Image: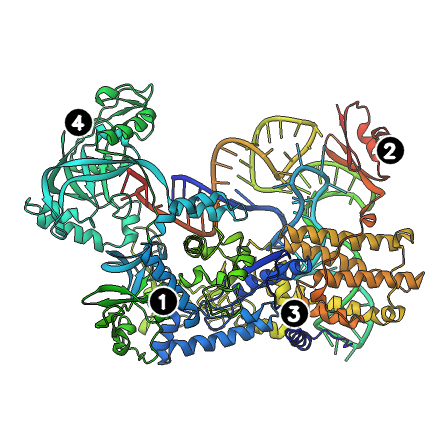
Amino acid sequence: MEEKYQPGVIEPKWQGIWEAGKSFEKEAAPGRQKYYLLEMFPYPSGRLHMGHVRNYSIGDLVSRYKEMSGFNVLHPMGWDAFGLPAENAAIENRTHPAKWTYQNIENMKRQLKRLGYSYDWRREFATCDPKYYKWEQMIFVKMLEKGLAYKSRSWVNWCPRCNTVLANEQVEGGYCWRHPDTLVEQKLLSQWFFKITAYAEELLDYTNKLPGWPEKVLVMQRNWIGKSTGALIHFPLEKEYIDGGTGEKIDRIIVYTTRQDTVYGATFMSIAAEHPLCEILSKGAGQEGKVADFCRRVRTEDKIKRASDDYLKEGVFTGAYCRNPMTGKQIPIYVANFVLMDYGKGCVMAVPAHDQRDFDFARVYGLEILPVVQPEGEPKLDGKTMTEAYVEEGTMINSAEYEGMKSGQFRSEIAVRLAQDGKGGPTVNYRIRDWLISRQRYWGAPIPVIYCEKCGMVPVPEKDLPVELPLNVAFDPSITGNPLAGAEDWVNTKCPKCRGEAKRETDTMDTFVESSWYFDRFTGVNYDRAMFDQKAVDYWMPVDQYIGGIEHAVLHLLYARFFTKVLRDLGLLKVDEPFTNLLTQGMVIKESLACPGHGKLNPDQIAKDNKCGICGATAGERVVQEGKPAVRVCMGHGYFYTEEVKEMKCPVCGLKIEAGRKEKMSKSKKNIIDPEELIRKFGADTVRLFCLFAAPPDKEIDWTDEGVMGAYRFLNRIWALVYKHREKIMEAGKDDTFDFLSGPEDEAKLWRKINLSIRDATERMDKWIFNTAISSMMELYNELSSFDPSQGDRKTRTALMRKGIETLLTILNPFTPHLCEELWREMGNRDLLVGRTWPKPDPRALLVSKFQLVIQINGKLRARIESDCGLSEEDAVKLALSHPNVKEHLQGKQVRKKVYVPDKLLNLVVG
RNA sequence: GCCUGGGUGGCGGAAUGGUAGACGCAGGGGACUUAAAAUCCCCUGGAGGUUACUCCGUGAGGGUUCAAUUCCCUCCCUGGGCACCA
């Protein structure tokens, strides 16, 4: 055995042994309890980052622990391989996206293997493989047949950087989710959608049936689905209009409202600027120009501004009127900037007395404010004197025969009456929109549809699938738009129906489609006769534990749930939900280091070409005080990597470095840690151990280099412990006949500690608090290292030492498997830890006969007395009263009450 | 504004009604060494005291309880998400 711990030598060795022994290759085994453990598969960017390492280290720990606990564990890995970065890299380097992608996969796979994760690599695939996306295209065709995939012309979010459309949920605060600095624009385009709204109710319903998910994620999904109950109300138009586009007759405006009880107070109508009615209603009413200008202006205003609190409520009269269906009164129709096209019907009945936005709008344009809900016990509301809308419940006024009814009751009654009168009726509304899946990009799964001049849109027949991406596509920086559209050989094809000239759909699918079913596909091993190996998918699904980042709380996790239900309804899956338990692991954060600059600069301190006269850094402008003009400041020298900074001084100008906020690791902040470099220095086991020890899995990890050193030192100490004792242990041989409990006190104590550690570690593993599970192992190490087997009965004590070390290696194995396997073997064992079962504590060793009796007086700790278990209250009191410190505190006082918790504490209440 | 987590030593974090600060890091002292690194041992919430021990202390204030970091109420700070949702 080497005296020094050398992870660089032993780790690759054990990785080879596991691979050769097929340690992680698993099969479906009906009758054996399965455990499907899945980590979110990575986008093959080329290099692992610490976030990956944390995610996969948690996954590997659980996988190995569950395996040792007797489960048949499925633990696969693959690649979310379609997507924009490959295409951007292709354009930059003039290489094909496939080449770039597969090179990245190769490197990341090497990195994953170097970390010793227990993946069944036979199941690996990349989603850009036609053998994978073939089945996705098949499902698309089936969804098309069922009306779950459809094409629609609509306003879409357009990212000018991606050069493609985005789904609503991919727009974050008006910016592209991929390009936080790029504003999303609105375009009217014909696009493909998946009808996720058809499953809105079930998706919502099941948020109450997923007890293994963090409540936070369920809440986000419920909010995203956004169910509300209300009514549709028809407002007849004063005259009939014709839709220039469709030729349809329009005689009414239908609105959705949750406050149908306020319908008598609807004094005008507001419609969204994107609404087709804007053009139709304003035509020939003398308002056409104004309305068109207004709509154009609102549409081009950025979403950030439209959503901001102080966005001024503006509108323009369309020139048209409709009638309040209850009062028959004529009411004007406005286009209003605050009305959203994609919520409800895109039209709002405006009740200024009871909605703040309508109230503000009415005040600006001098519209009537008519209160219809009177608050209890308040002076009568008057539209002329109200200062804000009254939005609470109350009693109906100005509402014909409903006068005096409670608003809540009227709300249900009016909904029923509207239905009876054919003027609308009760309804349920959802905020969620259908999933826009069209992408005008090359590197994605082609949508399997052909357009024929004679037959129209024809789905590609199943026998012709997959529709493979053409390889002879040129990538160079001059290309704008979708490179696929330029692949003429590919675009021009024959119609599957009439064999005539036809063209292929050039849109590809959103990459979230691939990640919506990859976990189902993992259940089969290179299965190519169908989408799934049915027996395998029925055995393994659902995923028992899914682990990934919180950033996918809505997007990926909602789509995957939807897709699972679609596949179920197509008869391909038997499960309702894909993921039984979900863990959203915390980010890895680290403080950034930046040069603060010299602050405010006087004009004479600014050198030419706009540099700081003191240090030469860029001189910029900054608004120091709101409302005052910007001042010139030295911007400093930006961010630095930790190793560039010596003694907290800027390496360029020597200013004292400012330690920034602890935040998510990013290249731009230069606060990243390269996992590969760490592995080179400390080994995979140390990196894994630190990731699991630094914080509970769902919380952030605050990265410190010292913390990593601590983990490394712990492993070195274990190595040294085994090195010190192994020869004596091997000489003594295996002999399990000792009864350590009846031996000397220090032997019994260590034996108890060994068993306590098993108990604690097991409990903590099952509760997912891995940091404290590691603590219990460190405590066990501490006890072992202070135990000297060369004193007293050497044979017994050496056997005890062996028990202790072997227990430690066994329970530490899922955390640092290389080190544990190596030391296990060095102690003379021939089997592998990877196949061993998780130990159970000896119940006899957990029994305690002595305890520390805690004595409190008025709840304050006054003494601790070592006592025998099972002490009666009477004896406890006697014992307490004999303690000098207790006596002192009781002097001249009377014990009024005694609280005794057996084997724990005695509290004496005195007065 | 709404919905959510969270606030404990110098730091990461333990303890979910019963001994606050496990475990690790950092720091201090000592051993080994020509020296340093590494390693090992001891100390380490604050204040007082020679010791025994005492007082204070889990964001702030109140409450429930024999007993509160833990339960309840009010407030402050902070991370995350959503936001004109009719």
Q: Residue at x 31, y 80 (%)?
A: A474
List the residue tagged with mark 1: A462
Quadrant position of the N terminus of chain A in the picture: bottom right
What crowding class fits label 4: few (fewer than 14 Cα within 10 Å), some (14-19), or many (20 or more)?
A: few
List the residue tagged with mark 2: A879
Amino acid at pointer 2: Leu
Depth order, front residue of A770/A705: A770
Q: Chain of mark 4?
A: A
Q: Residue at x 75, y 23 (%)?
A: A911
Amino acid at pointer 3: Ser
List the residue tagged with mark 3: A23
Q: Of marks 4 and 1, which one's residue comes earlier in the chain?
A: 4
From this view, report whether residue A848 is shown above or below residue A184. Answer: above
Q: Of marks 3 and 2, which one's residue comes earlier in the chain?
A: 3
The secondary structure type at the circle numbered 4 is loop
Q: Residue at x 91, y 51 (%)?
A: A742
- Same subunit, labels 1 and 3: the answer reads yes
Quarter of the rendering containing residue B15: top right
A17 on left or right of A546: right
Q: Of marks 4 and 2, which one's residue comes earlier in the chain?
A: 4
Foreground mark, 1 or 3? 1
